[in-house]
Image (tube, coloured by chain):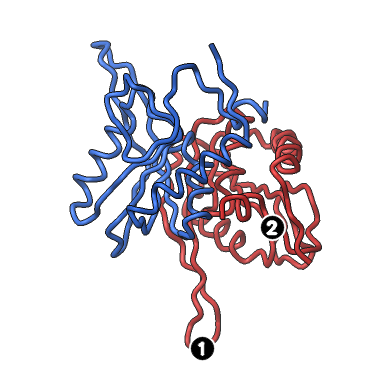
Chain colours: A blue, B red
Amino acid sequence: MKQYYSYEAFRDDTKKLIHKSKVFKPESIVAIARGGLTLAHCMAEGLNLREVQSIRTELYDKETKREEITLFGSCDFGNKTRVLVVDDIADSGETLQVVMSYLQSNFENVEFQSATLFYKKSSLYEPHFWINEANNWIEFFWEKDFL
Amino acid sequence: MKQYYSYEAFRDDTKKLIHKSKVFKPESIVAIARGGLTLAHCMAEGLNLREVQSIRTELYDKETKREEITLFGSCDFGNKTRVLVVDDIADSGETLQVVMSYLQSNFENVEFQSATLFYKKSSLYEPHFWINEANNWIEFFWEKDFL
């Protein structure tokens, strides 16, 4: 079953997520594109953070049928030490797990925490901050309103 | 005078901007962060483009009082040849002019065009695609709804 997720619901939940994430005192944000872009933008405004970078992943089916995620985009955090990684949903959790592991191993002096609007209990990765448990297929307003 | 720009207005204008931009047949999108992130995300959904990258600028006051823009973020377009650069507004136009010039000189085989929701007549750069002329100070919903 598809569940339409409107801008109004997004606005209210994002304000809650901003409030929750403040305990981490993030200095910079990494958006996972595309899904995390709008959320990262709005959280950056609410948290008053100017630095938003993005990273993109692609899932490949290898010949062996094992899936492999490739990351695109390089990050630079300067002297920042607390970075929030933002995506819309932790569904399988694979993307977030790969991104978090990549970032942490490449930037040892930075602490990374993650935030999503939705979290599926079956996800292999649980974000530090999340708002709703996802039981249905979420259809975000950005996936629907611009077609 | 401040003019609040709601999600509903954004949604309607972005659909128009998606329609206008289709003539360029973009294969990839660059968002100028922060302002262009939500628009780039929604345009990518409407244009069915998976590749969204972001670039960030900072304006510095140099000692000589001349302003200088520094760019953060590196792009990679693979074999793509038509890339749409997206920002919320061409106000002074300085950011867009610097970004477009930087991208074009660094990726000679790529054609770049630009799209914004607002364009101020006094801007020193006019985007290829824009929707509204800006006469007031625009207060975008992402700047207001998450405070």
Compared across the picture, whether A48 is left or right of A104 comes to right
Which residue is most to the bottom? B64
Foreground residue, A64 or B101?
A64
Q: Which quadrant: the C terminus of chain B? A: bottom right
Q: Residue at x 63, y 37 (%)?
A: A8
**Which residue is the site of mark 1?**
B64
Callout 1 amino acid? Thr
How packed is label 1: few (under 14 Cα within 10 Å), some, or many (20 or more)?
few
Q: Amino acid at mark 2?
A: Glu
Q: Which quadrant of the figure has residue A90?
A: top left
Q: How many marks?
A: 2
Work out whether mark 2 precedes mark 1 in sequence or the reverse, and give the earlier one. Answer: 1
Residue at 54% of width from left, 42% of height from top? A38
Q: Nearer the viewer, residue B49 or B4?
A: B4
Q: Which mark is residue B107?
A: none
- Report the front residue among A17 and A62: A17
- The answer to whether A85 appears left or right of B129 in the picture is left
**Residue at coordinates 51% horizontally, 54% vertically from top-left?**
A46
Q: Is residue B50 above or below residue A138?
A: below
Gap between marks 2 and 1, in whole Å?
31 Å
Q: Position of residue B142 (x, y in %)?
A: 60, 50
Residue tagged by mark 2? B139
SS for dot 1: loop
- In the displayed structure image, the side of residue A3 where residue A53 appears, left or right: left
Question: In front: A78, or A14?
Answer: A14
Indicate the quadrant containing the N terminus of chain B: top left, top right, bottom left or bottom right. Answer: bottom right
